[in-house]
Image (cartoon, helix red, strand yellow):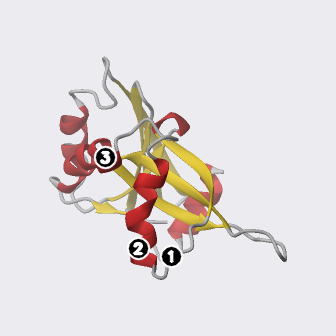
Amino acid sequence: MLQQFLRKWSRGAGEGQSLLVLHVFSQQIKLLHARQVKQGWQLHSEQLVAEAKPFPRDIESAITALPAGSKVAVVLAPELYQIIPLDKPKLPTEAELQQALPWLLKDLCPLAPEDMQLDYLDLATTAGAAAKINVVVAAKSMLAQLCGYLIKPNLSLLLF
């Protein structure tokens, strides 16, 4: 799967381009640094171990040591987010739906509504069935902390 991702990402990338992938778990972060060379990709993997929080103290120094301007993809481990299926509320606008979701999830998710960073996916429905959505929820405070580490050294976040 990593090779497929690198092939897809490398279209248009020249030799010497680098890509960073942070795989974030609840107790560790794995950092993969891939650099494109003539023969393909040169990979360097490093594991940063946390003590009790999602982010180890040395992640900031590890990230700032990376080449400025590198592209970074972040992958959250399943324990750092939830996917919650719901009947889609009948609200007139997208904005109202986004505002209502944290309060609809407050009893289904351990996070406080104010700390929910969420998005949803419409699911295919059959004729006559109620519209359904899958809501993806993560802790906004955790994501803000991680983004703070990534923004300081002028890294480019890849969005998929």
Quarter of the image where one finds residue 31? top left
Q: Residue furthest bottom?
A: 92
Which amino acid type corresponds to the residue marked 3 in the rendered image?
Answer: Asp
| Residue at the (82%, 75%) spot, across then down | 128
Pointer 2 or 1: first along the chain: 1
Which amino acid type corresponds to the residue marked 1 in the rendered image?
Answer: Leu
Above or below residue 56? Residue 111 is below
Please indicate whether residue 153 sits to the left or right of residue 156 in the image. Answer: left
Q: Secondary structure at mark 1?
A: loop
Please indicate whether residue 94 sits to the left or right of residue 87 in the image. Answer: left
Above or below residue 104? Residue 159 is below
Depth check: give the residue in front, 96 or 151: 96
| Residue at the (53%, 74%) spot, across then down | 11
Q: Which mark is residue 115?
A: 3
Q: Which mark is residue 96?
A: 2
Percent coordinates x, y for residue 82 in the rendering: 53, 43
Q: Secondary structure at mark 3?
A: helix
Which amino acid type corresponds to the residue marked 2 in the rendered image?
Answer: Glu
| Residue at the (47%, 62%) spot, across then down | 119
Residue at which label 1 appears = 91
Percent coordinates x, y for residue 68 in the rendering: 21, 57
